[in-house]
Amino acid sequence: MTAELAREIIFRSGEHLVLVASSVALALLIALPLGLAIQAHPRWRRLVLGLANAVQTIPSLAIFGLLLTVPLLGGIGSTPAVVALTLYALLPLLRGLLTGLQQVPPGLKQAGQALGLSGGQVLRYVELPLALPSLMAGLRVAAVISVGVATIGAAIGAGGLGVFIFRGIATVNNTLLLAGALPAAAIALAADACLGALETHLTQGSRQPRPRPWLRRRWALASALIGAALLAIVLGWHQLAPPGPAGLVVIGAKGFTEQQLLGELLAQEIEEHTSLQVRREFSLGSTFLCHEAVRQGRVDGYVEYTGTAWSVILKQPSGPGASDRASLWNRARRLYAERYGLRMFPSLGFENTFAILIRRAQGQQLGLRTISQAVLPARRWRAAFGYEFLNRGDGYPGLESRYGLRFAAPPTAMDLGLTYRALADGRVDLIAGDSTSGLIPALKLQVLLDDRHYFPAYDAVPVFNAVSLERHPELVPVLENLAGRISAVTMQQLNAAVDLEHQSPELVVRRWRQDH
């Protein structure tokens, strides 16, 4: 493990802890008064628990996806992640509290009332102490669940240890997978142990003589202030906080190898040629997340592809002129500025188009060179595509229509990084990869030519928020100086260094910059 990776693990672990602690604390602030309010009303109790159960049945990734378009509490970043984790933590907390209250023997409550205790005093001195073990059990379950689900928050730019897991899946790197999974497991075990110790302390403390009234009031006031402060931080974190220090630039990237390399290239060039500090957000999984992040100013810039910008973001038809690289860049650049206030810089020098891939031995055996020639044998094949390719305008639906592609079964959806291995291992027969992937020659795969010119041009171009460029005009010459610096062959070699030799993107880029 490198020192850089160790530092990032510590940083991401801190992010993970903040996400989990904020969400569990917020869920506790909601569950306690709500549970006390509904515990004596069976109809409301069934309704609230039913809703909490319904939330638990929704896959966590779907919850994160639904929150992307929700105003105020949605979007990208840590805010929607805290909201989703809070929803998941509510059920075990509510169930623990209500189960504990229902198990209090009625005779004890009646005895308390007979001694002259009010309803509030019976709740405080009889019911809650007896319900405490059940509530703490729910709290421990909520904490452990939150630690696991929080890893998915990396898919919407929330950070945390899920960054390593998504990056490891994209690059098929077990070291990165373990860098995310092991600290997450350690946090879950530590949280459970700490809450267990707290439960023991509180349970034993409830048997000790009660503190003086003035001390109880002081503790109650302190708890209320801490809860209110935490609630304000959780709800207002991103809405009220400034974008960051004046000398900070945030560079984003999608969740696959090439994007991490290009993001690292931008970051290192900025760090060397300016006095700006750079924060890297390299786990924004999809095109939509990166675009929204740069449009909203959450990140200052990232690298996009002209064909993706044209078809997916601008939703323009491909048409015959979309394969003209210069024309497509000019039109996309103008629309990006008009619609989104974004500046598209000239190409870094290479195009990364979709590559329809088969095994090289298979192509040689059948004499296949083009996609059209593969249409007939494909009816006996199995295909696998990345999630984005299956749904985007310039992806599988249009390809199927243009070529009349049909397979023996509907294409399997899987992570893009895993499709290469699935093809090489014979589990599928055709995939859509990246033309600059280093896995193509290494795994002996063959690219089928797009003989009907379905795909538009996909030049790699830096895209930056215009407001960020006004704030940091020194970025412009740095980005313009990168134009034409990287060829498709070079990009494939850099990708191979990460995917096959398991070198870190940071080290690969640094070495390439030193050599060139």
Image (tube, rainbow, N blue to C red):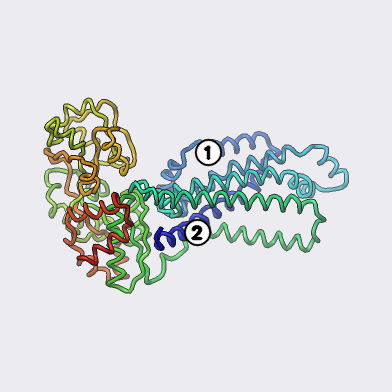
Q: Is residue 505 above or below residue 70?
A: below
| Amino acid at circle 1 | Gln
Foreground mark, 2 or 1, reads 2
Measuring from the top left, give residue 333's x and y in whole percent.
20, 57
Measuring from the top left, give residue 225's x and y in whole percent.
64, 61
As drawn, is 177 to the left or to the right of 208? Answer: left
Q: Which mark is residue 249?
A: none
Residue at 37% in and 58% down = 281
Q: Earlier in the sequence, mark 2 or mark 1?
A: 2
The residue that disc 2 covers is 14
The residue that disc 1 covers is 56
Residue at 76% in and 60% down = 216
| Amino acid at circle 2 | Gly
Q: Classify mark 2: residues with Cα within 10 Å, few (<14), some (14-19) or many (20+).
A: some
Quadrant in which residue 275 is drawn:
bottom left
Relative depth, front residue between 152 and 424: 424
Q: Classify mark 1: residues with Cα within 10 Å, few (<14), some (14-19) or many (20+).
A: some
Quarter of the image where the N terminus is located? bottom left
Quarter of the image where the C terminus is located? bottom left
Residue at 82% in and 56% down = 209
Measuring from the top left, give residue 59's x and y in whole percent.
46, 38
Q: Are marks 2 and 1 in contact (CB under 8 Å)?
A: no
Question: Residue 75, can we see it?
Answer: no
